[in-house]
Image (cartoon, rainbow, N blue to C red):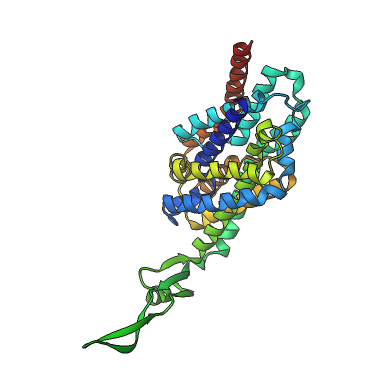
Amino acid sequence: MLEISLFVVVFALSYLNGANDISKGVATLVGGKVLRPSQAIAWGTLTTVAGAFAGIKITSGLIKTFSTGILAQPFQTVVFPIAVAIGAAGWVLFATRTGWPVSTTHALTGGIVGAALAQIGGAGIVWPALVTKIALPLALSPAVSFAAAWLIFPGLRRALAGVNNYCLCVEVQQTQMIPVQQIAVGTTAAVAVISTPPEIQVVADKVETCEQTVSRSGVKLHVADSLHLLTSGLTSFARGMNDTPKIAALLVGATLLGGTSMMKLFSLVAIGMCLGSLLGGRKVLETMSGKITAMDGVGGFTANFGSSALVTAATFMGLPLSTTHVTTSAIVGIGVRSHGRANWKVVRDILLAWLVTLPAAAFLAYLFSMIFKITVH
């Protein structure tokens, strides 16, 4: 029964991760008016799931960190990962309903600390490893992301100054019915026709040329928006690579899934993230895309360019960066650099939510562990 419960709570945590984190890669697309929220969520979900599966071969370091890396000994009971997942999921659920973008990485870390304190005491945690492997990367990444966005934005704006005069347009031309021959049927004549396959027309030219060449039914994207779409996808892809192994690590060693391949474990997490993104991703997206700062295409491209590079590099190095911290800090950096300000009230609320995440998840995991211990004994 406990093993089935672990399966359920890990899936729930994956769902909530999708609902809270999908906005991290696509908020700039909505804020910059490149895509509608539903389109942005669909794009982010697709690229996140792709990243989740791509990470199977390269994320062993993250799996080790979040399964045994900060514990003095491997957990001996399924109650431990259940408590961790409940602590993390409980806080992420509250934050998602409130519209706060919070870090699942922080929540998982808090859950591990709370469950360990309740079940094996402070000696069961390798505190130096906790600081070097998790705390320092998480603490430094917002500052690095803010600085990167602030520094590279002016150069990218100059480099892309004339790009918005050009457009990439795609149109699928409808199937045509061409008469071939007349066939006599009794006293009447029938015309046999064949259909031509649809043709795809692609035009890359100045905006005026695209407007004249491609009909209204075609898809028109400025080149800057196309680049923005690409970096947004890369950010979501990197998030999928970095977040999936952290959650899948809770299932490592569980008896129910003993011997189960990493592909199946990652698939479980990826399906949960996918459903959470599609069904619950709007609330936090509203905060990220419209309440922090005003954005345009170049600003969004810059934020995602820096975020995707930072999270991808961290994934290959086995560092558990928070995509939440990285992307939010980049968006704030763009706002300060381009407009001289951001909505500091919203930024303050987000920062407070970040500070509360680890202790809140730790408390919930500790509380569940103690209740279970009292109930069993």
What residue is at 48 percent from the left and 43 percent from the top?
A: 288
Answer yes or no: is residue 106 visible.
yes
**Image spot of residue 349 (x, y percent):** 50, 32
What residue is at 40 percent from the left and 69 percent from the top?
A: 218
Kindly give the residue lying farthest to the front in the view shown.
Answer: 186
Q: Is residue 320 above or below residue 170?
A: above
Q: Is residue 377 above or below residue 258?
A: above
Viewer-nearest residue: 318 or 142: 318
Q: Quadrant of the N terminus?
A: top right
**Image spot of residue 258 (x, y percent):** 70, 35
Left or right of 250, for residue 284: left
Residue 89 lies in quadrant: top right
Viewer-nearest residue: 334 or 236: 236
**Image spot of residue 243 (x, y percent):** 62, 42
Viewer-nearest residue: 298 or 51: 51
What residue is at 69 percent from the left and 22 percent from the top?
A: 116
**Number of dots carrying numbers:** 0
Kindly give the residue lying farthest to the left in the view shown.
Answer: 187
Q: Quadrant of the C terminus?
A: top right
Q: Is residue 148 above or below residue 110?
A: below
Answer yes or no: is residue 238 visible.
no
**Image spot of residue 249 (x, y percent):** 68, 36
